[in-house]
Image: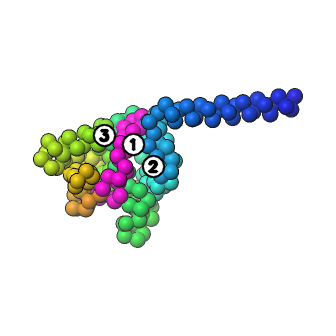
Amino acid sequence: MKTRRIISGLVLVITFMTTSVALAQKEKTVNVGGAPMYPSKNIIENAVNSKDHTTLVAAVKAAGLVETLQGKGPFTVFAPTNAAFDKLPKGTVETLLKPENLKTLQTILTYHVVAGKMNAADIVKAIKAGKGKAILTTVSGGTLTAWMKGNDVYLTDENGNSSKVTIADVNQSNGVIHVVDTVVLPKS
């Protein structure tokens, strides 16, 4: 009897592992922060697995935006890495995570989101149509200016600061993520 339970348990583990491997092989994943990002999962389900986005995930949770980013969308998210948050003045992230700064945190995070799904080709097409610049309206109501330097796409915020897209087209079930190297900030 004990042997049968062990064998049944092993069969379940092997079945789970085989299913996971088959899913990864079936879906075109992109590795971000050491983890595969599955197009069949939503933005939050994928982001929580990226070791490069722990600050962003903590901020999204503190801002109460998890449910929104798990929603239908579609969304285009310019996702700053932990290193991008580290570029902010010392103490900025800790201050933003305080409950009394909820509205400011929400504004900054939604400034990194554009309604609709814009993959890299769509952004490049908009830049070319705009003769070198594309104005993207963010969910917070602000604007980002997309432009190119060589083959790289950059965003300039309303304060004139630039951020480079380091990983493009991380497809999600409810949109797309483009990883960026600097936090962009709306005009205050």
Is residue 146 found left or right of 65 in the rendered image?
left
Q: Does the rendering let one see residue 100? A: no
Mark 1 residue element: strand
Pointer 1 residue: 170
Picture residue at 29% right of the left edge, 57% below the top: 163
Secondary structure of the residue carrying tag 3 is: loop
Give how far apart the Cα atoms at labels 1 and 3 are: 9 Å
What is the span of residues highlighted in magenta in the rendered image? 164-187
Identify residue type, mark 2: Val
The residue pinned by badge 2 equals 32
Vertical arrangement, residue 88 with respect to residue 130, above or below: below
Of pointers 1 and 3, the one earlier in the residue sequence: 3
Q: For the residues marked 2 and 1, what is the alpha-carbon distance in whole angstroms?
A: 8 Å
Label 2 with label 1: CB-CB less than 8 Å = yes
For badge 3, the amino acid type reads Asn
Q: Say whether residue 120 is left or right of residue 24.
A: left
Q: How is the image coloured?
A: rainbow
Amino acid bearing label 1: Val
Residue at disc 2, secondary structure? strand
Give the alpha-carbon distance from disc 3 to disc 2, as whole Å. Answer: 16 Å
